[in-house]
Image: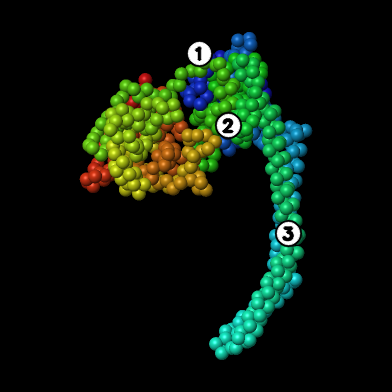
Amino acid sequence: MYFTATFHKKQFSSLPEKLGDPFSYLPSDAVFDAFKDFLSILDSDDVLKTELQKGKMIGVLVVKNRAGETGYLLSFSGQLFGKNEYPGFVPPVFDILTPDSYYKSGEREISAMGREIKDLESVLRLESTMVKENAVVKECESRLAEYQEFAKQQKSLRDSLRSSATPEDIRRMNNESSTQKNQIKRLKQEVESAKVAANIPVDRLKKQIDDLKSEREKKSRDLQRRIFRDFRFHNTKGEEKTLLDIFSDEVMPPSGSGECAAPRLLEYAYRNDFQPVSMAEFWIGKSPSGRVRHSGTYYHACRSKCLPIMNFMLEGVELETNKLDFDYENEEIKTLYRDDDILVISKPSGLLSVRGKECQTSVETWVEGICRDYSGPKIVHRLDQDTSGIMVIALNLNAYHNLQKQFETHSIQKKYVAMTEKIPSTKEQTIILPLAPDVTNRPMQMISKEFGLYAETYYKVMEEKDGKALIDVYPHTGRTHQIRMHLSSEEGANAPILGDRLYGSKSTICRLMLHAEKITFVHPTTNKEMTFIDKAPFDLDTVISYN
């Protein structure tokens, strides 16, 4: 039998002073201890353990109760065993699955309308087939075709007689031609009238189906809005807002909003007078299709559904400083080469390639500061913020367009060096997996055969030590997060890059161990092939620290 208490008392050796930012954090030792405690209890529950192996996000919140006792609360995202509640986990903010719920009756009504639409569409297909075979239409079309053939023959005869015809004959032939044209016009009208008559049942069916679809869409939208009004959240000030209030009436919240682990935990804590101390979300089980999730690894809260909710719920709460923001200021941008056309640099890890929404310091702003005589575009390609290495920058418009074309045609050769958390099972491989933005969890990417863009990466393991690997990587295409996704995905190398805070195990010990080490391209003016190398600042014997 699984534990039934929601508050699991536990003593912790240390507690953090502030709550972590749910969108960029490192779990405290207390949260890790609580999660390990949960896993040890899970080992004695084969039913739940088997269910979780299908893949589930588990939320852990270390709290203090009103008596000052410490412990932790648990939650899960979505449903477990097809339900929103399960013993040992905090309940949902609002349960739409209760037997007498208006959601159930509304869903049944909408489903019934869907079945009716499907049945009517089957009848429509049959009626449409019958229209094509309609006897009246066919008879009218046959009379038209026969008369058109007769009129055609009569026209040919008149044309052959015109050269020797008298004025009287020509008047007669013109009248005859006019009469036949009018007859063809009348026969065409008969065909159209027959078709209209035959299509009356079809048109009525189409209108009925369209009306039903509109009504179903309205009922579905009204039901969704009613549900979102019943999802009510609080913050530390005691203020309450519905999902519609949080997302604004004009913007419908994404499907599933309010059902994630993090807001469930906070809402339960606020309603039951628990003081939140530290929180984290851990993935357990199989990775979801197309996405990278490693069992036992913690992940930040999703932005599309949770960011507006958590921003409201954490209003006035002083959060812990983001430990995942590495300090790049102690490292300078290295200039490897410069002439009148191009600038080749080495970017440190942690520095943006282009200015962000808040115009942070970036390679772009740095270049603008040292190159004021050219105001056009300069950044031809980008490196992820956490990736270090070589970038080629244009110093005039001709160079920009020339280099841009080389990148578009994949004629530029690039080599990266990566250190992975574990050794890939395949020591040398070409990975071809299409990538697309994960719109529910930006900036992460996902594998999508339906919507993804072609992405190809070749890698080769060069060294191995203590379960880690140093590998050379050659991307043929340049998709966002391509190397990180291809190496971390189970469908790829299944070996996340060390220090990857999006697709691997986040760390304060080291930065993302990915470096653009070598690039070969043709100079935009001289047309000479140029190669630049900037050796990776890490190896298997050392780890760069940004602390």
Q: What residue type is labelled 2?
A: Lys
> Which residue sits at x=68%, y=74%?
182
Q: Which residue occupies the extreme right position in the image? A: 100
Separation of marks 3 and 2 at Cα, in angstroms: 43 Å
Left or right side of 83 for 430:
left
> Which residue sits at x=38%, y=32%?
354
Q: Quadrant of the C terminus?
A: top left
Q: Which amino acid does label 3 sit on?
A: Val
Question: Is 194 drawn above or below residue 296 in the view shown?
Answer: below
Q: Could you classify mark 3 by the number of other residues whose Cα lies within 10 Å: few (under 14), some (14-19), or many (20 or more)?
A: many
Q: Which amino acid does label 1 sit on?
A: Glu
Q: Could you classify mark 2 by the number of other residues whose Cα lies within 10 Å: few (under 14), some (14-19), or many (20 or more)?
A: many
Q: Could you classify mark 1 by the number of other residues whose Cα lies within 10 Å: few (under 14), some (14-19), or many (20 or more)?
A: few
Task: Name the residue that disc number 1 marks.
Answer: 17
> Which residue sits at x=33%, y=26%?
544
- 280 or 528: nearer the eye? 528
Q: Where does the image place residue 508, in percent across and percent down from the top left?
A: 41, 23
Mark 3 or mark 2, which is nearer to you?
A: 3
Q: Is the Cβ of the residue at disc 1 closer than 8 Å to that at disc 3?
A: no
Left or right side of 314 for 543:
left
Separation of marks 1 and 3 at Cα, in angstroms: 70 Å
User: Which circle marks residue 202 in the picture?
Assistant: 3
Pick whichever of labels 1 and 3 is earlier in the sequence: 1
Q: Is the Cβ of the residue at disc 1 closer than 8 Å to that at disc 2?
A: no
Task: Name the residue that disc number 2 marks.
Answer: 305
Left or right side of 17 for 525:
left
Pick whichever of labels 3 and 2 is earlier in the sequence: 3
Look at the image and tell me whether residue 262 can be seen: no
Q: What element carries label 1?
A: loop
Q: Which residue occupies the extreme top position in the image? A: 67
Q: Is mark 3 on a helix, strand or loop?
A: helix
